[in-house]
């Protein structure tokens, strides 16, 4: 197998490097990259239900529950009952969570620019379109 020709190897390595890069960017906030992304999503739209947050983050419920637990322990979010549906809860940023979420969003935007700095606008657009197409295709293949 030639690693340069294996898309799975190339995607895995790009993911590893990107994850490490983002981890370094958000390390000063004492949160993981995934926690930073969750806080960023909540910063954009606070008080989502856990189901809505799961859809937005594309994380399974077990993984998301663990992240929510850790963010709640860190007092960055709190769970509150949903007045529209007693069977669900809404995830709210605390005041500190709002501040950390804002900084996480800023750092993620900065990391995106820095990580893609060597690409032209056209190359970035093509990259995003290609990744989106690959994701759609993978979902279609898995659905059978």
Image (cartoon, rainbow, N blue to C red):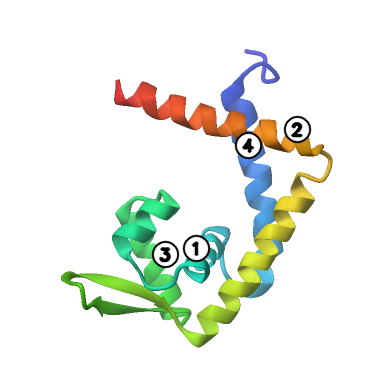
State which tag comes first along the sequence, 4 or 1: 1
Label 4 neighbour load within 10 Å: few <14, some 14-19, many 20+: few
How many angstroms separate mark 4 from mark 2 (CA)?
A: 9 Å
Residue depicted at x 42% and y 54% = 56
- Secondary structure at numbered mark 2: helix
State which tag comes first along the sequence, 4 or 3: 3
Question: In the orientation shown, which residue stands out farthest toward the left?
Answer: 86
Say which residue label 2 marks: 123
Tell which tag, 2 or 3, sits nearer the viewer. 2
State which tag comes first along the sequence, 4 or 2: 2
Say which residue label 1 marks: 41
Q: Examine the rendered structure and indicate whether residue 70 appears above or below residue 21.
A: below
Label 3 neighbour load within 10 Å: few <14, some 14-19, many 20+: some
For the N terminus, the image quarter is top right
- In the figure, residue 116 lies in which quadrant? top right
Say which residue label 3 marks: 67
Can residue 33 be spotted in the picture?
yes
For the C terminus, the image quarter is top left
Label 2 neighbour load within 10 Å: few <14, some 14-19, many 20+: few
Say which residue label 4 marks: 128
Q: Examine the rendered structure and indicate whether residue 49 appears above or below residue 74.
A: above
How many angstroms separate mark 2 from mark 3 (CA)?
A: 33 Å
State which tag comes first along the sequence, 2 or 1: 1
The answer to whether mark 2 and mark 1 are in CB contact below 8 A is: no
How many angstroms separate mark 4 from mark 1 (CA)?
A: 19 Å
């Amino acid at each position: 197998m030639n690693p340069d020709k294996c898309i799975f190897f190339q995607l895995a390595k790009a993911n590893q490097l990107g994850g490490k890069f983002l981890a370094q960017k958000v390390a000063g906030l004492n949160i993981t990259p995934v926690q930073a992304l969750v806080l960023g999503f909540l910063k954009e739209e606070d008080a989502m239900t856990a189901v809505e947050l799961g859809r937005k983050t594309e994380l399974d419920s077990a993984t998301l529950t663990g992240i929510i637990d850790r963010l709640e322990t860190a007092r960055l979010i709190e769970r509150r009952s949903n007045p529209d549906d007693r069977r669900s809860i809404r995830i709210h940023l605390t005041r500190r969570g709002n501040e950390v979420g804002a900084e996480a969003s800023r750092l993620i935007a900065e990391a995106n620019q820095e990580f893609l700095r060597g690409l032209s606008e056209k190359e970035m657009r093509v990259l995003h379109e290609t990744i989106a197409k690959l994701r759609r295709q993978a979902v279609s293949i898995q659905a059978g």
